[in-house]
Amino acid sequence: MGNVDMENVVIAGAGPAGLTAAIYTARSGLNPLVLEGPVPGGQLIVSPEVENYPGFPEPISGMELMDRFRKQTEQFGARFKMEVIEKVKKVNDIFEVDTGTGRIETGTLIIATGAEARRLDIPSESKFYGKGVSGCATCDGAFFRDKEVLVVGGGNTAIQDAVFLTRFASKVTIVHRRDYFRAVPAEMEKAKSNPKIEWLIPWVVEEIIGANTVTGAVLKNRETGKTQQIACSGIFVAIGHDPQSEAFKELVETDKNGFILVEAGSTRTSTPGVFACGDVCDPVYKQAVVAAGHGCMAAMDLEQYIYIQRRT
């Protein structure tokens, strides 16, 4: 498989978690190598405006914010490769990272590969992602003040997102494909008692309408086949996230949904020398500022691990 490089630290992922981990490990003189994967900058780069990241009183695009992360990382000497990890295995005290184009050996590994919001899988969705279609109500809800929006989904996240969005939107319509909900009764009661929330059950989104931004959607009733067009300025897709952990499932423990399990109050995984941070181990918050904090924790946990290893 070609030459094998030996590293002190390999960081998988270049979103807020991975780049923050790279800043801290680089400043500590550990010379980290960041494997960027298919989406350098992570999911945040699709956000046209970010207005809730501390230190930026004016909105900034997700692309520019992550570019600033990277520049700060590079000034401390972190290195980057646009490689996708296919598999990692531990051989003695070394981790062998297979990227498909070669192999990298490392003494420690930080997994920061994130989680991808599930999509509706309709052709028009990708056209409007970041232009009215969003997978994060807490990130983008404030941009839809006094506008009508849809929330697609029937679990806790969808119902919680709908209630949250009523703080800004004039009307929130929950679109759900089934005639029952997976959300817990307490969350359902909050939504049912909210006068801003309306319901379309059992309907699905067939097409998203608009020019430069979303102006509406075509919905289809799953029982009758009837279609209708509804006006809206935003569509929040809340049908779950898929953690990007497949390459590591033989290395570390995950929960039933694939999120990597870490020790409480730390980023340590089930395998010594491997740490996880950000959305790949966070099924709850999914916020850039939280991911960045996790990245800091992972770097500090890793530094402590190396310190102990060198003393023994």
Image (cartoon, rainbow, N blue to C red):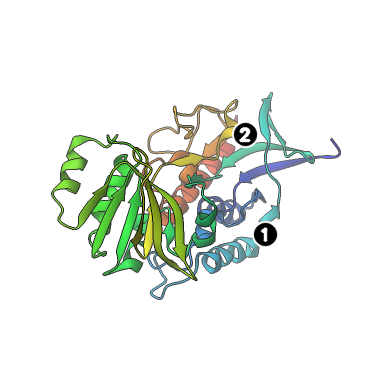
Left or right: where 255 falls relative to 97: left
Looking at the rendered structure, the kind of residue marked 2 is: Ala
Q: Quadrant of the C terminus?
A: top right
Residue visible at 24% across and 61% down?
171
Label 2: which secondary element: helix
Residue visible at 48% across and 67% down?
48
The tag on residue 247 is 2
Residue 197 visible (yes or no): yes
Residue 237 visible (yes or no): no
* Residue placed most toward the observer, 3 or 92: 3
Label 1: which secondary element: loop
**Residue found at the far bottom of this picture:** 58
Would you identify the image quadrant in which residue 274 lies? top right
Of label 1 and label 2, which has the lower sequence position? 1
Residue named by callout 1:
77
Q: Residues within 10 Å of mark 2 (few under 14, many from 20)?
A: some
